[in-house]
Image (tube, coloured by chain):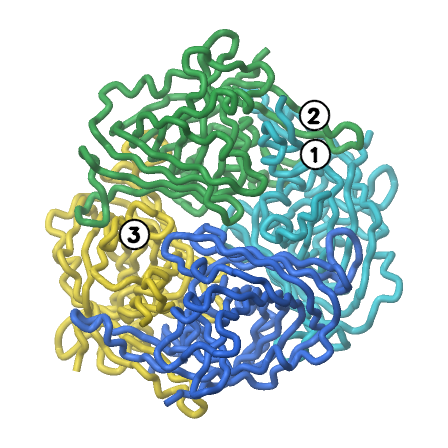
Chain colours: A cyan, B green, C yellow, D blue
Amino acid sequence: MLKGYTVPLSPKGEANGAMAPPWHYAGDVVGVEFWTDPAAAEATLPEGLSPDPETSGRVVAYFFDWQFNGENDEYLDPVYSQYREFFVLVDAHYDGQPVSWCPYIYVDNHHALARGLVQGFPKKIGQVHQTRVFASPGKASPTPAPGARFGASVSCDERTLAQARVTLEKPLDDPSPLLSRATINLRHFPTLEVGKYDKPAVHELVRMDYGDQQLAEVWIGSSEIEFYPAPREELADLRPVRSGMGFRGSMSYNVTQVFPLG
Amino acid sequence: MLKGYTVPLSPKGEANGAMAPPWHYAGDVVGVEFWTDPAAAEATLPEGLSPDPETSGRVVAYFFDWQFNGENDEYLDPVYSQYREFFVLVDAHYDGQPVSWCPYIYVDNHHALARGLVQGFPKKIGQVHQTRVFASPGKASPTPAPGARFGASVSCDERTLAQARVTLEKPLDDPSPLLSRATINLRHFPTLEVGKYDKPAVHELVRMDYGDQQLAEVWIGSSEIEFYPAPREELADLRPVRSGMGFRGSMSYNVTQVFPLG
Amino acid sequence: MLKGYTVPLSPKGEANGAMAPPWHYAGDVVGVEFWTDPAAAEATLPEGLSPDPETSGRVVAYFFDWQFNGENDEYLDPVYSQYREFFVLVDAHYDGQPVSWCPYIYVDNHHALARGLVQGFPKKIGQVHQTRVFASPGKASPTPAPGARFGASVSCDERTLAQARVTLEKPLDDPSPLLSRATINLRHFPTLEVGKYDKPAVHELVRMDYGDQQLAEVWIGSSEIEFYPAPREELADLRPVRSGMGFRGSMSYNVTQVFPLG
Amino acid sequence: MLKGYTVPLSPKGEANGAMAPPWHYAGDVVGVEFWTDPAAAEATLPEGLSPDPETSGRVVAYFFDWQFNGENDEYLDPVYSQYREFFVLVDAHYDGQPVSWCPYIYVDNHHALARGLVQGFPKKIGQVHQTRVFASPGKASPTPAPGARFGASVSCDERTLAQARVTLEKPLDDPSPLLSRATINLRHFPTLEVGKYDKPAVHELVRMDYGDQQLAEVWIGSSEIEFYPAPREELADLRPVRSGMGFRGSMSYNVTQVFPLG
């Protein structure tokens, strides 16, 4: 009997791209809030979601340096467990409640991609980078302090898709508003039969369940972000018309499930 | 209404990792036939397949340099359309007929990975290489001729998993036996709900349908292949106990569908 | 006594990034001739070279798929021996003779980079791709024939720097004009002492010596090429103002030496 | 007049792989001290260095996550400025003084490679990883504390060359002994003329000059490290026979020069 969670299933159940949960995460984030044309934001929403009437056009872009862990100290094997990720979350409404929707997301690790597809994150492979802080001072590392600056970028298929800059102003004493919206994803797995390309085998909205979610050392400030058009990418259609808050900090949580909606 | 085939679905339907078929392929292959412990081969088979009693333990390893094309001249954008792939096919029986089963497969391009998952190929990202032939002669390129040698290798997560060597002996006049077995895949998409990790949302055997399949300039000869153990990989459990034919040539086909079984 | 050719020197002399010559090469090329602003071309020339008065502003861009070989069948280890390369050659005069000068060159393999630096090629790491021909016919592969099209691209540091397109018209019966100009390189190794950053330890013009150089299956036709600005890159300052011949074929040669000039 | 520091020299002087100093660095390090066969250590020494009679066979392996900065806020462009590096330093004597010698070093960024070659570090391209600490707690990140564990690895040409593990015991109050030895490098640039492959154009021992060198948050503890043989690599000839101290912390310094010896 084959074992494992995602493919490949195998005799020992070790070869799978993603092992079964629980999945533990810790990471650093450089984030940028901005507003785009509300029609562009709305165009990315799946059936079942509608614009948030209070914040229509609001998007938050996240550049993450992540470290994953499973049940077997996988964090000690950084080739397997570390990855970097970029995604945007669009403000929306589901059933009258404010939620977030992720139209585009890129990671640089195929195990993270495998986990993401199961969660309904529409992951592609990309390269993501952010300025880091190191404990030893000097001109090569910012220190979290007023005026400290952080750069970040993402590319896919050898083209830079976005570049951002965050300048810190002050610590965020209560970071909980950063976590106030539920994230709604779309688990989707197509059919490969003639005449049924638009009849997916799986197509269901789910609500992410983040366990033990924590934020630490979050600072906020000002931000800039720019998107660049590229073939077969639509991220640039969410081009910013107004910039908002920037932030930089650390986050951790775990994942064991999603909740199917409707 | 969101458009596209695989995720991400998007307003224009261009951002998807894999566009809807038809999918056209052309490539070069270095192939190695070998025999492993029949129990090791059998252990990789999904429910519904059984060992082929006539060839139990027979496996063929393929190293491919591929070029993909869709309906819009994607072959002119080689960043998108080219990829290299390694996989093994294990001889098996389905419903009393000789078939092939693919337990492990690696590609170096995320678009190829997205197409593969829909087909039921259990793709992970890996790096694959094979010796090439160039038209201009010299010491840096073999010429298809008796004694010509080709090397090939595959790695995943920074570890070499297999290395192979093929030495040509003669052209294969009728390559059709190389295509005689149907390939059976397993489309599989997990559930992410506590208590249901082993109740996948999709789990169905399918038969691949290769359209207009052609082989060209196929030579056969002798072969060597070696597998190397690595964390979270089970390919090395199919270690060769006897080597068989090696081959090198070109192949093309297209894909529009798979046939669900049972 | 340490052995080897380039660093690292080592007890066995096997760890060096580049082994001592002879170096054998075979490859496929997609090439594009174009004219840029003569002042932009001249600005790239080192002291000792002057514009070619007959062809001032003429540049040829080359996208190569290469296979290297040394004295020990290194072509059988494609991870080591294969690489892809982009470079531009600017028409110039040296000592009254027509020559070529390479201002910018990118490769995707660090062993090729190590060999190039010794030859005076100013290599950086980049990603290079070109449409390939496969022997098995179909919609995924062009066949060298009138109207066949080839795409090519190069990126560095996650930004696409150039994209090209060649459409074949006819075979080139005598490809020797493609090889008529000597290539002049600049071997350059800086000093790392305060006040001497501009007093390099090595700074010498050399003439490349290509042994047993051959071309095969060369077709010519029309071409397009576009350069894209990027931080810390100056390739785009050679932007085309007029396009010339495109070509596609195979080349092989070997290298054992360069000739110091002056 | 062409400008720049390393190749390519160019009209604006911006295209060079490495700009002229000053070079500023900050990074995290996972380090492992071990003893190898003294004859193996001695075999890596260049002419001019001899074994340290007090510590013969002692080697320290370093896995670094680095961030570079020049004079123009390059740390805000992490694609350019971040890199990861592995190297070993062998204890030796120069002119009767205890020094360190670097026989092998790998980096994942070609700009870092270009700077290293000028300094006399024998860099090749490799992939390097280390477990990271994140401020937000949880099962995916160690906290610097007794018993905290860190993993690290390096690969080159798709083969893992070394894996290490460090378990922290206590903070290191005075980390200055970690910096007590001068590092001696060999600047080496070959000649490419027949008969002169062993007569390099540059071949000089230099002493590194680290400016404003600082360490922070250094912990020490126990360590494990294993080397793996690979084609064209000799690192595994330094295989450990006895393990020593492990450490983990942060470091910063700057570089403007080296001092030629003799």
**Residue carrying label 2:** B201
Q: Position of residue B17 (x, y in %)?
A: 56, 40
Q: Chain of mark 2?
A: B
Residue D110 drawn above or below residue A145: above
Q: Are marks 1 and 2 on the same chain?
A: no
Left or right position of D173 against D159: right
Q: Chain of mark 1?
A: A
Q: Chain of mark 3?
A: C
* Image quarter hosting the N terminus of chain C: bottom left
Three-letter residue code for mark 1: Arg
Quarter holding residue A66: bottom right
Q: Do callouts 2 and 3 mark residues in contact (Cβ within 8 Å)? A: no
- Residue at image location 32% in from the left, 77% down from the top: C188
Three-letter residue code for mark 3: Trp
Other-residue count near label 3 (Cα within 10 Å), few / some / many at <14 / 14–19 / ≥20:
many
SS under mark 2 = loop
Q: Position of residue B110 (x, y in %)?
A: 53, 42
Q: Do callouts 1 and 2 mark residues in contact (Cβ within 8 Å)? A: yes
Disc 1 to disc 3, how far (Cα)? 42 Å
**Residue carrying label 1:** A187
| Mark toward the viewer: 1 or 3 | 3
Three-letter residue code for mark 2: Ala
- Residue at image location 64% in from the left, 48% down from the top: A105
